[in-house]
Amino acid sequence: MNTIPTVPAPQYSGKTIQETYLNILAEIATKHLSPTSGKARVAASIVYKNNLVSCCMNEKKTHPFQAKYKSNDHSIWLHAETNAIKTALKVLTLDELSKSTLYITRIKYVDAKRTGLEFGNSKPCEGCFRCINTFQIRKVIYSIDSNDYGEL
């Protein structure tokens, strides 16, 4: 039986709450990254009053929620951002969701040999922005390529 070598998730060096949540998502994305899952994985979470409400991955399955917020006719897969929002709607009111923070982390392989991992740009696509705006999510924190994060 062949085993897939595991590579530790990259870590943000700081200790801010934003970096803490992005590191948690990096661990989750790393555990779901494999040679068959592609070059990268995206994980997203909704945090309300410092409570992790939902934590979801991008998924290669179609879903009516994603169909509503797709950026083009080829974007039919469930994105991590819309998945996290959809899941959070099961436990939060619309008012609570609007006061929440959406965190997004992209983990990708450093090279073609898949010997290491690094953070990638996870700024939401146009369709995910529409979903974020529809539910009036107040803050979005996302990983970027330079081992830093952006904020909307």
Image (cartoon, rainbow, N blue to C red):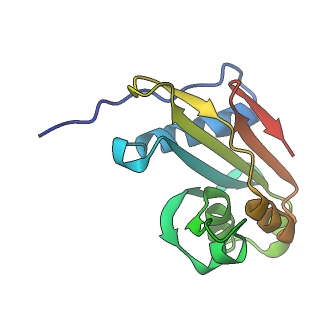
Residue 90 in sight = no
Q: At which x and y percent is residue 146?
A: 71, 24
Residue appearing at x 44%, y 27% in the figure = 8
Residue appearing at x 88%, y 56% in the figure = 138
Q: Residue furthest left?
A: 1
Vertical order, 12 against 50 (above or below) = above
Residue 21 in sight = yes
Vertical order, 75 against 3 (above or below) = below
Q: At which x and y percent is residue 112?
A: 43, 28
State the image quarter where residue 132 is shown.
bottom right
**Number of marks in picture:** 0
For this rendering, which residue is in front, 135 or 66?
Answer: 66
Query: Left or right: where does residue 8 sit relative to residue 132?
Result: left
Q: Residue furthest bottom?
A: 64
Residue appearing at x 70%, y 32% in the figure = 19
Residue appearing at x 70%, y 67% in the figure = 72
In the picture, which quadrant includes the N terminus?
top left
For this rendering, which residue is in front, 141 or 60?
Answer: 60
Query: Left or right: where does residue 60 sit relative to residue 67?
Result: left
Query: Left or right: where does residue 113 sit relative to residue 151?
Result: left
Q: At which x and y percent is residue 35?
A: 35, 41
For this rendering, which residue is in front, 93 or 103?
Answer: 103
